[in-house]
Amino acid sequence: MPKFAANLSMMFTELPFLDRFEAAAKAGFKYVEYLFPYDYPKEQLKVKLQQNGLQQVLFNTAPGNVQAGEWGVSAIPGREADSQRDIDLALEYALALNCPNVHIMSGVVPPGENYAKYKQTFIDNVRYAADKFKPHGIKILLEALSPQVKPNYLTASQFQTLELVDLIDRDNVFVQLDYFHAQNVDGNLSRLTDALKGKFAHVQIASVPDRHEPDEGEINYQHIFAKLDEIGYDGWVGCEYNPRGNTEDGLKWFEQYK
Ligand SMILES: O=C(O)[C@@H](O)C(=O)CO
Ligand SMILES: [Mg+2]
């Protein structure tokens, strides 16, 4: 049975961020993930996790200057120092929060830029991170984002991300398989899951096309969850969706998994 993590960046947004931990625990979650911890001291987040009996399973490196269109800097040529600073900070948080996975955000490749140069920059920066995280047993995750959500992100297809994982060639670097993006770009989700077997170490879910609860839309998540069990996937499944309305009202799908 999948181990579900509440995504506190998207769920329970009726509440201030720090109150979402308690709401997730009360709703029956044992695990949480969210995009960025950096607005809060790590000690404060650690207390929130402990008070609510939760384990943090994922967060991302910092996004850079979001107002200027950045969504990660680790693929941007000339920004290696910023990338390494973000990676070092992520490691500090991961250690303090006892978090087993960190997603390294690549960034956007503006049209007309040299794609190969961005790709190589990302490979180099992720290798830096992999070697730093390895002694601590922390996995690095790389994610493809569909153009509907983030146009011109370094990777849109799961297969582009898989190619990067292979090129980076470190045993603690994996794909973060977000089925919402995968359905938008690649489709054929059962075969895709087989093709990525052993190469992904975290999963995220949402309905397609509306990115709501996994009980509507064109993906049959009952089938996907059975597929993940069938291949022996033992990582977490992050609920990275925008609730249709009140978060708790939308959690009927989760009843059977508590
Ligand atoms: O799918 C997403 O958008 C997220 O998982 C993320 O980490 C950054 O955009
Ligand atoms: Mg995702």
Image (tube, grey):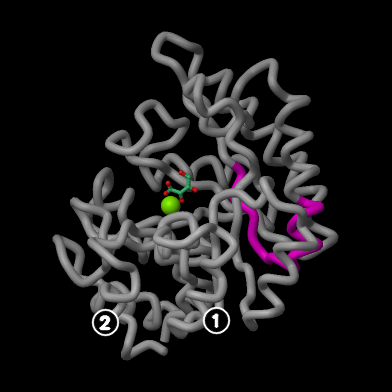
Tell me: 193 left or right of 39: left
| Mark 2 secondary-structure assignment | helix
Q: In this orientation, which residue lies closer to the viewer: 187 or 58? A: 58
Q: In this orientation, which residue lies closer to the viewer: 49 or 62? A: 49
Residue 29 at x, y = what percent?
A: 49, 80
For the N terminus, the quadrant is bottom left
Amino acid at pointer 1: Lys
Nearer the N terminus, badge 2 or badge 1? 1
Asked if residue 76 lies in the magenta stretch, the reply is no
Residue at 74 percent of width and 44 percent of height: 129
Answer yes or no: disc 2 within 8 Å of ligand 2: no
| Mark 1 secondary-structure assignment | loop
Residue that label 2 marks: 252
Magenta-colored span: 91-104
Residue that label 1 marks: 30
In this rendering, the answer to whether 115 lies above or below 56 is above
- Residue 119 image-quadrant placement: top right
Residue 77 at x, y = what percent?
A: 64, 18
Amino acid at pointer 2: Lys
Residue 216 at x, y = what percent?
A: 16, 67
Residue at 39 percent of width and 47 percent of height: 158
